[in-house]
Image (cartoon, rainbow, N blue to C red):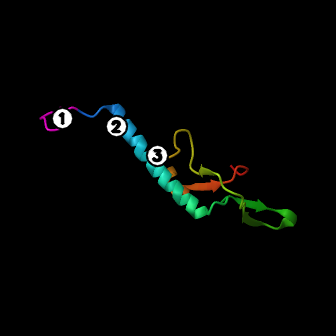
Amino acid sequence: MDTSKLAHPKPRPAALERKAKRTARQAQDEKENQKVRARSGGRCELLEFHYPGGICGTTRCGKRAVHIHHRIGGWGMRARGPSILAENKLHLCVACH
């Protein structure tokens, strides 16, 4: 029986609401991850700082990137709020991650 047309419809179960939110969040996270992969071109985006002989310069690592790293972290914060956006993620190699 469809209860949506009743005067006082039965609410959707909380477990289904949580699952729908989680699925939507995962879909948005994967969409943002695709942007990060496209931006990096498959190469590590970490900037390395070199100070040999007093010369200060920065270069990208450039190894093959494997992991998506969230720059905004904290317990329970990954893939929520601004952490989910592509500009707050880096594509990193195994050594740099």
Secondary structure category for the residue under label 2 = helix
Specify the amino acid type for callout 1: Asp
Percent position of residue 80, x then y: 47, 46
Mark 3: amino acid: Gln
Q: Residue at x 45, y 51 (%)?
A: 28
Q: Residue at x 63, y 60 (%)?
A: 42
Q: Earlier in the sequence, mark 2 or mark 3?
A: 2
* Secondary element at image label 1: loop
Tell whether 1 sits left or right of 27.
left
Q: Quadrant of residue 3?
A: top left
Q: At which x and y percent is residue 4?
A: 18, 38
Q: Are marks 1 and 3 in contact (CB under 8 Å)?
A: no
Which SS class for mark 3?
helix
Q: Magenta stretch?
A: 1-10
**In the image, residue 3 lies in the stretch drawn in magenta:** yes
Residue tagged by mark 2?
17
Q: Farthest residue toward the left?
A: 7
Query: In the picture provided, is 76 more to the left or to the right than 53?
Result: left
Q: Quadrant of the N terminus?
A: top left
**Where residue 2 is drawn, which disc sits there?**
1
The type of residue carrying mark 2 is Glu
CB atoms at circles 2 and 3 under 8 Å apart? no
Residue at the image position 73 percent from the left and 65 percent from the top: 59
Name the residue located 18 percent from the left edge and 35 percent from the top edge: 2
Residue 72's x, y, as percent? Answer: 56, 49
Residue 25: say if magenta: no
Q: Which residue is mark 3?
A: 26
